[in-house]
Image (tube, helix red, strand yellow):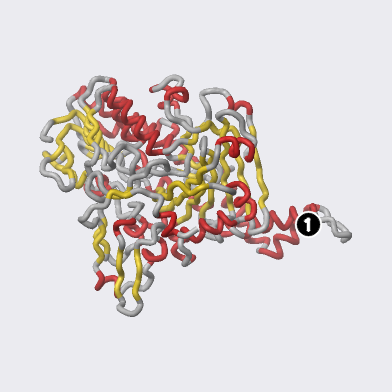
Amino acid sequence: MNVDDIQQLTQFEIDEQPHIIVDREKCRTCDHRACVQACPANCYTWDEATELLSVVYENCLECGTCYVLCDKGALDWSYPRGGYGVCYRLT
Amino acid sequence: MAKYYDVIIIGAGPAGSMAALTLARTGLNVCLVERGKYPGAKNMFGGLLHNAPVLTDAFPSFWEKAPVERHVYRKVLAFMTPESAISLSFDNENFEQPPYNGYTVFRPVFDNWLAQEAVKEGAMLLCDCTAEDVIRKDERIAGVTVKGREGELRGNIVIAADGVLSFMAKKAGLRQELRSADMGVGIKLLLGLPEEVINERFHLVRDEGADFSFVGTTEGIRGGSFLYTNRESVSVGMVVHLESLTASGRTPYDVLDELLEHPQVKKLVKGGVPLEYSAHLIPEGGLKAVPQLYTGGMMVAGDAAGLCYTNGINLEGINLAMTSGVLAAETAIVAIEAGDYSAKTLSLYRKKLDDSFVMKDMKTFRNAVGMMHMDRLFGTYPQVLAGIMETMYRVDGKPRSKLLRLARKEVLQKMGLMDLVSDGIKIGRSLL
């Protein structure tokens, strides 16, 4: 099972306006990057070469795991605007 | 959107919709605000809707009307090691009689149904609306603003049933920052299987369903896994303690993958076609993590209020949510009759919760949180049990020992006797 494959099964209504904004400078000072490891949707990637954290908010399941785990105040995390984001059918 | 309501409810989940239904039935002017395209679009859970008196009171013969998948007939608790499974399976004819003890449901289907029932009773449902902030007036909460839209919703009382992250309770100053130590993350994969295959594989007939809880399948991370049978699919997933997951360095989907590859689980899900993947946080902090439940003009219900517990055997939340929604609505009715929306009047909500099974159960199992943080439960104990079982059943021409000697040897090999005593005390305090 590949998370990127199973993620394709879930429906999203993608908003052009991101609901997660990361402060990359603060992420550089982070020693755990728990968001990268714990996100169930694999939304976060840390690039060792550039020392930059990137987020694919379009795949976000809105669970809030990263929001709870970030202790650097680096995440501006809110629910997407009404009607946008993940749209479960059968779970 | 500048209309004035008696009650504004944030979140059309089980707590919010039960509150809306209760209020609408008394003829009050209720607005139910939902951020999804439809109620349930943002909601997931393992899969079991517990029976709740508030549900059967609101809908007699509920199981004939609501879109439920199967009622739970068999409960299985299994301790697993990478090679083995030790199961306690409870099949009960008394769970065959309505009102059934629990049902597997799909949240986007069930939550939508429940909200539409509230609409039939006169509640106003506003989908596609994410509440952004609370509006204060005269020292109390008097409404909410909606994200990305001009305008606001105003009313006498706001019920925050906006889920585990409850931004409304936070904005109202009712809850602290959420801690990873108080949270579990649940992830789940829905696998499609033909109805006949499920019935044969799990020995079920008609609407019967099975509920499996697995301990020991989370690579030592605090938590457990589950499998629920729906009509034409099975829900397989796990709930892991967020702090423990982080400490493990593992990704949640890799741990789920291991579960699906477990030899005994693999047979249960064989041929399953992946249909949907989902994730959600669960408030697991127990009684001590319950926020302040009311303030002037506002009450908090369901996951938003942290009303959820597990003692290792019972995993309850949705029934507590629906009950808290009804109790918040009953309190709102009293407040509206009196024309008094102060914190003092709304404190009746806390009293009602304290008098109900909701807070009583939260209190009874307040120590279970500590037990569920006992790391040996998720690796060592399943291994000790499996070791005893294997030696007990293994036929290899070696002389046998009596059971106690066998158990002592297993315990000494894998842990210490003092560990067993201290864990025994913890388990005793939680369950006995």
Please tell me which residue is depicted at 58% across the width and 37% down the height of the picture: B210
Res. B343 in view? no
In the picture, which quadrant includes the N terminus of chain B? top left
- Check the residue under mark 1 and report the chain it is in: B
Q: Position of residue B145 (x, y in %)?
A: 16, 43
Please tell me which residue is depicted at 53% across the width and 30% down the height of the picture: B101
The image quadrant of residue B353 is top left
Tag 1 residue: B391
- Image position of A29 with respect to B124: above or below: below
Q: Position of residue B177 (x, y in %)?
A: 30, 55
In the picture, which quadrant includes the C terminus of chain B? top right
Res. B20 in view? yes
Q: Position of residue B283 (x, y in %)?
A: 40, 48
Q: How many marks?
A: 1
Q: Position of residue B364 (x, y in %)?
A: 49, 40
The amino acid type found where label 1 is placed reads Thr
Q: Which sits in the foreground, B135 or A38?
A: A38
Classify residue B138 as left or right of residue B196: left
Callout 1: helix, strand or loop?
Answer: helix
The image quadrant of residue B396 is bottom right
Please tell me which residue is depicted at 53% across the width and 23% down the height of the picture: B98
Q: Which sits in the foreground, B149 or B302?
A: B149
Q: Which sits in the foreground, B37 or B9?
A: B37
- Image position of A57 with respect to B104: above or below: below
Label 1 environment density (alpha carbons within 10 Å; few <14, some 14–19, many ≥20): some
